[in-house]
């Protein structure tokens, strides 16, 4: 039992555990005093504006040429992923979207899905999923109710979107993925 406990990182958990970082090669447990953690975070990040895109950027900086995404025979490095997300983020901003603008991802599971989310977060926008099983009325309701200002969609959804696009004047940018 002692050997099992030594190998199990969860055995180190206590009421003061703040986080467990696990990976294929290492696991570490960070402990902190709950009373001082707020002060620590305030000192380390006075304006807590980081998001998941910041994590991806750091990974891309460190592992530029390493594989980030694989989809069938397509393979993209972290550098490529970051460049593509940056390009979309810039285009979203150039289209007039601003902080907290809503970006709909009307996509199947593909590399562009994660790129869309990352791009939106890089630009301070709020990405959201559009279920690919929805019909025209449901997609219209969702995009309208969410105040979507941009939609990234698979090209096969273009016929459905063409039926409703004129009723979504707040959408400033449409991006088709083939």
Image (spheres, rainbow, N blue to C red):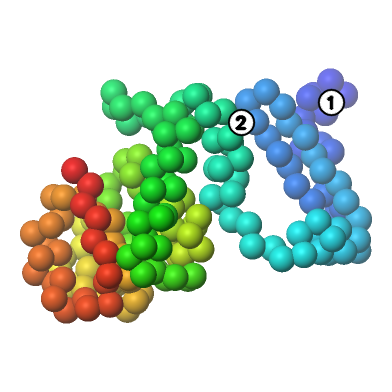
Label disc, if present, on residue 167 of the rendered structure: none
Q: Position of residue 108 (x, y in %)?
A: 27, 47
Q: Position of residue 27 (x, y in %)?
A: 73, 31
Q: Is residue 152 left or right of residue 46?
A: left
Above or below 24: residue 54: below
In the picture of the structure, the residue carrying the numbered disc 1 is 6
Displayed quadrant of residue 150: bottom left
Above or below 158: residue 65: above
Q: Position of residue 173 (x, y in %)?
A: 27, 64
Pointer 1 local density, CA inside 10 Å: few below 14, some 14–19, many at least 20: few
Q: Is residue 163 visible?
A: yes
Above or below 14: residue 64: above
Q: Is residue 128 visible?
A: no
Q: Position of residue 162 (x, y in %)?
A: 10, 65
Q: Residue at x 42, y 46 (%)?
A: 85
Q: Is residue 144 left or right of residue 56?
A: left
């Amino acid at each position: 039992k002692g050997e099992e406990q030594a190998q199990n990182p969860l055995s180190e958990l206590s009421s003061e555990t703040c986080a467990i970082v696990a990976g294929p090669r290492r696991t570490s447990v960070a402990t902190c005093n709950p009373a001082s953690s707020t002060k620590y975070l305030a000192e380390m990040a006075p304006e807590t504006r980081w998001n998941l895109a910041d994590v991806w950027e750091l990974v891309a900086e460190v592992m530029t040429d390493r594989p980030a995404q694989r989809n069938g025979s397509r393979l993209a490095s972290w550098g490529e992923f970051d460049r593509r997300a940056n390009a979309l983020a810039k285009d979203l901003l150039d289209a007039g979207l601003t902080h907290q603008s809503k970006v709909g991802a009307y996509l199947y599971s593909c590399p562009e899905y994660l790129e869309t989310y990352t791009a939106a977060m890089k630009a301070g926008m709020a990405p959201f999923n559009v279920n690919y099983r929805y019909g025209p009325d449901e997609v219209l309701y969702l995009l309208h109710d969410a105040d979507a200002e941009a939609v990234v969609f698979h090209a096969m959804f273009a016929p459905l979107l063409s039926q409703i696009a004129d009723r979504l004047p707040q959408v400033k940018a449409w991006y088709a993925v083939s």
